[in-house]
Image (tube, rainbow, N blue to C red):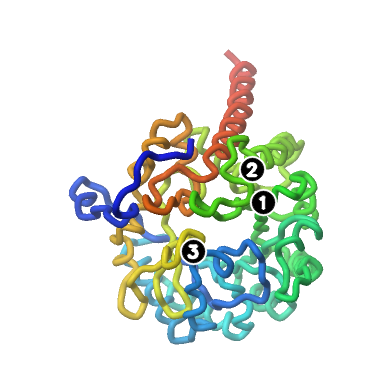
Amino acid sequence: MGEEPGADALEWPAGLDVDRLLELGWRPTALRQFIVKLHSRCNLACDYCYMYEMADQGWRRQPRRMSKMTVDRVAARVAEHALAHRLGDVEVILHGGEPLLAGVDHTRYAVRSLRSALAGVAGLTVRVQTNGVLLDEAFLEMFAELDVSVGVSLDGDADGHDRHRRRVSGRGSYDEVRAGLERLTSPAYRHLFGGLLCTVDLANDPLVTYKALLEFAPPMVDFLLPHGHWGAPPPGLPDPGAIYGEWLIPIFDHWYGAPRRETRIRLFGEIVRLVCGRPSRSESIGLSPAAMLVVETNGGMEQVDTLKSAYDGATGTPLNVYRDSFDTALLLPAIAARQIGARALSPTCLACDIAQVCGGGLYPHRYRPGSGFRNPSVYCADLYRLITHIRRVVAADVELLAKAAPA
């Protein structure tokens, strides 16, 4: 399922003709999510990190912290875009590196600048994604004051988490992350808890991992497949046995069959939506247009940062918030490619019976050196196994409901 015949001289989508797409009636989708890199360094050294451990080392050239001037310019550009497209609401995710390294006062400044710029223009949701190590009372008081949702990265129990998420010294970070989560989930701050991100590790037991996450009663869990592609596959791939799909299925079965909903699991929820004919709300699955953009600490506009796993410069654009509007980014071939749905899929994907659900998988996982991103995901077999399993389970329930309905 993974091979595509031949390789283009120009890696796709470099040759994508956006003018022709416009002539044919395609129109770009306005951006609604802005990932703002408040700090470009990290206090952990996770060995699977796409930013620091993979192909693109552009972080070395970035300012450590986004300046107040750049913060204000980003805020103005977000407001400009929201006004031009009459958006009812937008989302800003403060990211890194580790965004909390920016400090409490600078983070407060960034949030206030964004809220001031968007006041009277559009609703604004602000989230921060953190490794949790610096999540102390001062940050939590500020997040409560400014209504900032907090997502934390946690890879299961202590053994599973500390295998990869360590300090430079090699010391694990679980105890520090747990302490931060206990502060976040205390009664005063639990309303700020956005959820947990967990990177799948085949060495961990899936149900042990899931139950360790449930210990914190997260409102949402997002299981992330390790980043990689056809030229640099993730651990264990490519494998026709769908080892990652098989790892996820016991969690799905437990989650779906639980007598009460224990939490939301984004990947599973989006697949269920898609098999029921509804559009995806996630970039990792389905064919909905990607409506997010990254702004680096120097104000540079970049594509989704997980593309750093593909090759050096994969996220780059020539645009910067000091010179360019976000509308300009929408017409770049690399950005348009994420918004054209099935036209971005490979022939293999188009011929697949779950194409509308899978959508080719996460875009960075499709990369193959020499041909670019118009390939099936390196997780093709895993996605097929997981999606068809979920489809069968949901179809069986729909059939039972139909039989139970009054004539």
Residue at image coords 71%, 35%: 253
Which residue is painted at 78% across and 66% down in the image?
174
Q: Is residue 251 left or right of residue 321?
A: right
Question: In this rendering, would 192 be left or right of 68?
Answer: right
Mark 2 near mark 1, Cβ–Cβ under 8 Å?
yes
User: Going by the image, does 258 lie left or right of 287?
Assistant: right
**Picture coordinates of residue 359, whole percent (x, y):** 45, 42
Q: CA distance from mark 2 to mark 1?
A: 8 Å
Residue 294 sits in which quadrant?
bottom left
Three-letter code, disc 2: Tyr
Question: Would residue 89 be visible to someone looking at this image?
Answer: no
Q: Position of residue 292 (x, y in %)?
A: 44, 60
Q: Which residue is mark 2?
A: 244
Q: What amino acid type should be assigned to the residue bearing mark 3?
A: Lys
| Residue 142 spot, x, y in % from top left | 65, 78
The first of marks 3 and 1 along the sequence is 1
The picture quadrant where one finds residue 187 is: bottom right
Which numbered disc covers residue 308?
3
The residue to which callout 1 is attached is 200
Q: From what the image shows, is residue 5 above or below residue 16?
A: above
Q: Is residue 345 above or below residue 100?
A: above
Query: Which amino acid type is shown beneath numbered disc 1?
Result: Val
Q: Is residue 305 left or right of residue 100?
A: left
Q: Residue furthest left?
A: 23
Q: Mark 2 or mark 3: which comes first in sequence?
A: 2
Q: Earlier in the sequence, mark 2 or mark 1?
A: 1
Nearest the viewer among 176 and 106 is 176
Judge by depth and name the residue closer to the eye, 168 or 132.
168
* Tag 1 secondary structure: loop
The residue positioned 63% from the left and 77% from the top of the image is: 100
